[in-house]
Image: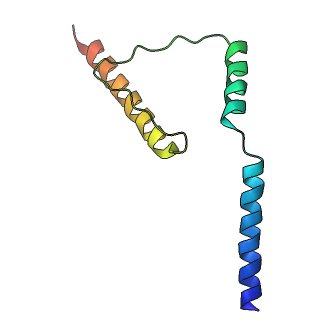
Amino acid sequence: MRTFLAFVVIAGLGLLYAWQKHHEITPVAQQESLTHAVSSTPAKPTMPTLASTPVREVSEHNWMKRSLDRARDVRDEARTRTKEGQNP
């Protein structure tokens, strides 16, 4: 009975994985949907980036690192603005 339950669990996980892979958006389709979304929305002004901050490439699958990098960038921008605002 334990062997059968283990088989059912493993088969279920395999089917879930196959279903998820089948319904995954491909990078090409994702890029096309992004260009559609970008072309229909007005352009937003961007903040100038600091010259001393190196631009790092982060994998799309590494969302935790990307979140931490974004938080660090926002923190540094806020510190810079505060410092500039306090200088007479």
Residue at (72, 45) in percent of width and height: 24
Residue 70 picture quarter: top left
Q: Tell which residue pokes out farthest to the left in this image.
A: 88
Q: Tell which residue pokes out farthest to the front in this image.
A: 28
**Residue 25 horizontal side relative to residue 73, left or right:** right
Please name whichever residue, 54 or 87, is drawn nearer the observer in this view of the structure: 54
Coordinates of residue 58 in the picture (x, y in percent): 46, 37
**Residue 52 horizontal side relative to residue 12, left or right:** left
Q: Tell which residue pokes out farthest to the top in this image.
A: 88
Residue at (71, 82) in percent of width and height: 6
Q: How many marks?
A: 0
**Residue 65 horizontal side relative to residue 41, left or right:** left
Q: Quadrant of the C terminus?
A: top left
Q: Quadrant of the N terminus?
A: bottom right
Residue at (77, 47) in percent of width and height: 23
Residue 38 picture quarter: top right
Q: Is residue 9 above or below residue 73?
A: below
Q: Is residue 40 above or below residue 69?
A: above
